[in-house]
Image (tube, rainbow, N blue to C red):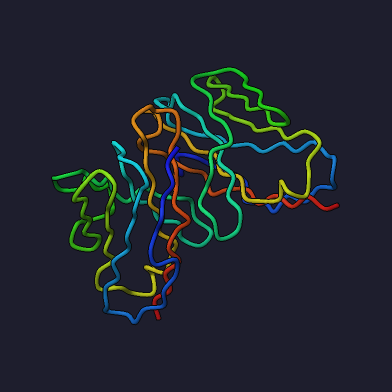
C-alpha cells in the first residue's frame, strides 16, 4: 500500500465549477500537508500548506486536513481554465525536507 | 524564494551510459534534494545532497547507481549511472531554504533511455 493515495484523474470541469481534490494517507507521523500545482513540463510550485489539522484559505483555494480520517482536500472555487494543471498532494513529518507525494490529479477546466 | 536552474532540460541516452544532471540555485540554501518522477508514478525522493559529505539515500536508491555531489551551498549534481530504459523519468532538484516554509523545485530533466 502506498503511503499517500491520490486519484490520478483526469478531472474535467466547466469554468466556474467548484473542484474538490483529495488524498488519503497511512502514516500517522505526517504533520505537514502541502498542495503543489504542476504545469506541463514545469516543476511543481507550492500552492499552500497546512500544519496539523484544520482549514486554510487563500483566495479561491481552501485546504482541509482531517488527521483523524487521514484525509486531506483542496477545494478550488470559481475554477478558471488557467487552473488546468496537475495537482500534487505532499506530506511530511519534518516540514519541507523530505516530502512524500501522491501521484497527482490532472485537472482540466474548460471555458 | 529560490530560483533553480537544471541542466540539461532533456536528453536521450543510450543504455549502459551515464548522465550527469546539474542543479544551480541563485542563493545559498540549507537543504538540496533529488527526486524522480516516473511516468504515472508519484514524485519519489532519491536522496538528500549534503554539502561537503556523502549524500543520504532513501530506501531503494544506492550511491553506485545515483552518485551525488554537492561541493557548495548553491550547486549539486546527480549522475544516473549505467542507464537502462527503466531509468527513463523526470529528475527534479529541490531546495529548502532553511525557513521550513517552502520547498522549491527546478523545472526537471526529462531523461529517455533507449
Residue farthest to the front, as pictured: B26
Indicate the position of residue B42 as horizontal and vertical percent values. Answer: 48, 51
Q: Is residue A1 visible?
A: no
Residue B110 vs B16, above or below: the answer is: above
- Answer left or right for B101 relative to B28: right
Q: Quadrant of residue A3?
A: top left
Q: Between A69 and B79, which is closer to the camera in this rendering?
A: B79
Residue B64 visible within the image: yes
At x 40%, y 33%, the residue is: A96
Residue A16 in picture, x, y percent from top left: 85, 40
Residue A105 percent location from the top left of the image: 63, 48
Left or right: residue B4 versus residue B80 is: right
- Screen quadrant of the N terminus of chain B: top left
Q: How many marks?
A: 0
Name the residue located 32 percent from the left edge and 63 percent from the top edge.
B21
Residue at position x 62%, y 46% from top?
A: A7
Q: Residue at x 41, y 74 (%)?
A: B11
Q: Residue B58's x, y, as percent?
A: 28, 46
- Locate residue A79: give its quadrant: top right
Amino acid at each position: 500500500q502506498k503511503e499517500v493515495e491520490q486519484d490520478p484523474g483526469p478531472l474535467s470541469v466547466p469554468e466556474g465549477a467548484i473542484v474538490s481534490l483529495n488524498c488519503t494517507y497511512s502514516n500517522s507521523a505526517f504533520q505537514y500537508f502541502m498542495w503543489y500545482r504542476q504545469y506541463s513540463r514545469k516543476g511543481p510550485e507550492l500552492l499552500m500548506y497546512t500544519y496539523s489539522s484544520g482549514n486554510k484559505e487563500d483566495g479561491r483555494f481552501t485546504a482541509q486536513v482531517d488527521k483523524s480520517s487521514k484525509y486531506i482536500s483542496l477545494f478550488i472555487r470559481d475554477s478558471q481554465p488557467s487552473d488546468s494543471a496537475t495537482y500534487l498532494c505532499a506530506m511530511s513529518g519534518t516540514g519541507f525536507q523530505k516530502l512524500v507525494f501522491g501521484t497527482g490529479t490532472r485537472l482540466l477546466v474548460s471555458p | 524564494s529560490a530560483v533553480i536552474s537544471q541542466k540539461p532540460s532533456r536528453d536521450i541516452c543510450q543504455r549502459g551510459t551515464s548522465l550527469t544532471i546539474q542543479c544551480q540555485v541563485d542563493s545559498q540554501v540549507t537543504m538540496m534534494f533529488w527526486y524522480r518522477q516516473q511516468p504515472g508514478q508519484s514524485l519519489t525522493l532519491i536522496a538528500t545532497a549534503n554539502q561537503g559529505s556523502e549524500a543520504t539515500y532513501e530506501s531503494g536508491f544506492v550511491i553506485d547507481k545515483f552518485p551525488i555531489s554537492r561541493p557548495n551551498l548553491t550547486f549539486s549534481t546527480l549522475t544516473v549511472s549505467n542507464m537502462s530504459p527503466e531509468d527513463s523519468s523526470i529528475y527534479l532538484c529541490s531546495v529548502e531554504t532553511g525557513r521550513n516554509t517552502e520547498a522549491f523545485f527546478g523545472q526537471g530533466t526529462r531523461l529517455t533511455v533507449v
